Image (cartoon, helix red, strand yellow):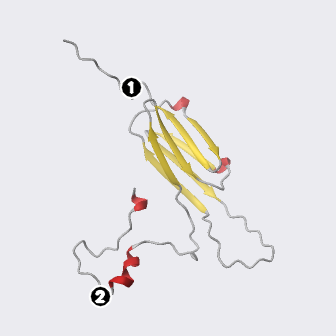
Amino acid sequence: MTALTPILRRRGWFAPPSRNFRNSFFDDFAVPSLLSEERGFTPAFDISETENELIVRAEIPGMDKEDIDIHLTDGVLTIKGEKRHEKEDKKEDYHRVERSYGSFCRSIGLPFDVETDKVDATYKDGVLKLTLPKSERAKVKKIEVKR
């Protein structure tokens, strides 16, 4: 959710507005420079839960499955990867390249125990899909009230 909210400068909640509000509005958003040397990316994650499992989908197009590293330790799922830029020059003059390259690392705290030996990971069409089955302890059990 933090990716959807702007990163505000530290000027306080109730600070008076700047004199040139229209021009300073976009200063509040952290926008990476297109010309910066430090290029990285943050893949989009979708996390859904069913009665028996947790499903994590990550959009990481343009990567090889060998460049993706997945760990599950102490209830924390960590997904790392590196997207490499292979420069191929064919005497073309590039004016702008709008692709993200670099490494990423995302960690997700799991709200329940999973059966680690039954975790399934697939990578197809740029989407990594992880299926994490809930352990029997984590599954919701309906308790019937007796008279």
As helix, strand or loop, the secondary structure at mark 2 comes to: loop
* Foreground residue among 136 and 76: 136
- The percent coordinates of residue 55 (x first, y second) are 50, 39
Q: Say left or right for 48 vs 147.
A: right
Determine whether, in the image, residue 94 is placed left or right of residue 45: right
* Quarter that holds the C terminus: top left
Residue 98 coordinates in the image, percent (x, y): 62, 69
Residue beneath the point at 62% across and 66% down: 99
The numbered mark at residue 19 is 2
Q: Residues within 10 Å of mark 2 (few under 14, many from 20)?
A: few
Q: Which mark is residue 137?
A: 1
* Residue 21 sits in quarter: bottom left
What residue is rendered at 55% in x and 29% in y? Answer: 117
In front: mark 2 or mark 1? Answer: 2
Q: Amino acid at mark 1?
A: Arg
Left/right placement of residue 38 relative to residue 65 reads left
Q: Classify residue 126 as left or right of residue 6.
A: right
> In the displayed image of the protein, which residue is found farthest to the top?
147
Cα separation between marks 2 and 1: 58 Å
Location of residue 105 with respect to 128 vertically, above or below = below
Q: Residues within 10 Å of mark 1 (few under 14, many from 20)?
A: few
Q: How many numbered markers are drawn? A: 2
Give the residue drawn at x 35%, y 71%: 8
Q: Mark 2 or 1 closer to N-term?
A: 2
Task: Note whether 100 is above or below 53 in the view shown.
Answer: below
The vertical placement of 25 against 131, above or below, is below
Residue type at tag 2:
Arg
| Circles 2 and 1: CB atoms closer than 8 Å | no
Residue 86 position by quadrant: bottom right
Give me the residue at 41% from left, 77% from top: 26
